[in-house]
Image (tube, grey):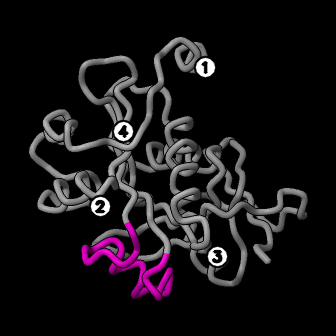
Amino acid sequence: MLQTLERTTTFDARTLTPEDEGALRAFCGGEGLPQLPPDALGPALHSGQIFGDYAGQPALQAAAALLPLYADIPLPTSLRAAGYGADGQGAVLTQPLLAEHYTQLRRFLRTALGVATARYASYHVWAVQPLDPGDLPGCEDLCAQYLSAGLTLRAVRPMAEATMLIFSARGLPHWREAYRRLHLADPALPRMLERGYAVGDFGWGAAGMELILRPAD
């Protein structure tokens, strides 16, 4: 049913302009986008750093921020401090904010990443997702969308007041032999990623989502 909806729903994702500010602020409900403080929303929009999709509706249905790593706000600052783009070059895609019945997240992510890699062609593009142990099924579903969009899970670590899944826009060779399967909440996952493994694909088992670890290099 989801795939049928994806084929029949209008998709018009693009970089938002200042003319979209009213629609964006209404969509955010007085808050900022995830990982983007409310006071940074306007400047990011006017700098061409907000990506959105109306999906054929009068109101926004999806939005995310594509932030340069040199930005002086919590998420890019935390990434730099952790060694991801420490020179301030590259960008990070925030977790998208979605309308309740938005069905095209995978396509939205792929399009946003296409814009990001074109804009920052010589540098690295990252993406993030908070890990909430209290909503593990929701986190698994979102992580599956990230991985299906072509992102690679590279780290799980405390960052910007949350435990964050850190994805890379650079792919992982799927032909390499799988080393191990772990669940998203497995305490061994952060250690395995630190040891040089990464997750580029996944499967589903009786206990839920199974992340497939392979050598990253």
The residue beneath circle 1 is 3
Identify the residue shown where x is 40% and y is 74%.
69
Compute the Cα span from label 1 to label 2: 29 Å
Question: Is tag 4's residue or tag 2's residue first in the polypeptide sequence?
Answer: 2
Question: Is tag 1's residue or tag 2's residue first in the polypeptide sequence?
Answer: 1
Nearest to viewer (mark 1 / mark 3): 1
**Residue type at mark 4?**
Gly
Answer above or below: position of 18 versus 37.
above
| Residue at disc 3, secondary structure | helix
**Residue type at mark 1?**
Gln
| Left or right: where 42 falls relative to 78 | left
Residue 26 or 194: which is nearer the viewer?
26
Q: Which mark is residue 178?
A: none
**Residue type at mark 2?**
Gln
Span highlighted in magenta in the image: 68-89
The residue beneath circle 2 is 35
Compute the Cα span from label 3 to label 4: 31 Å
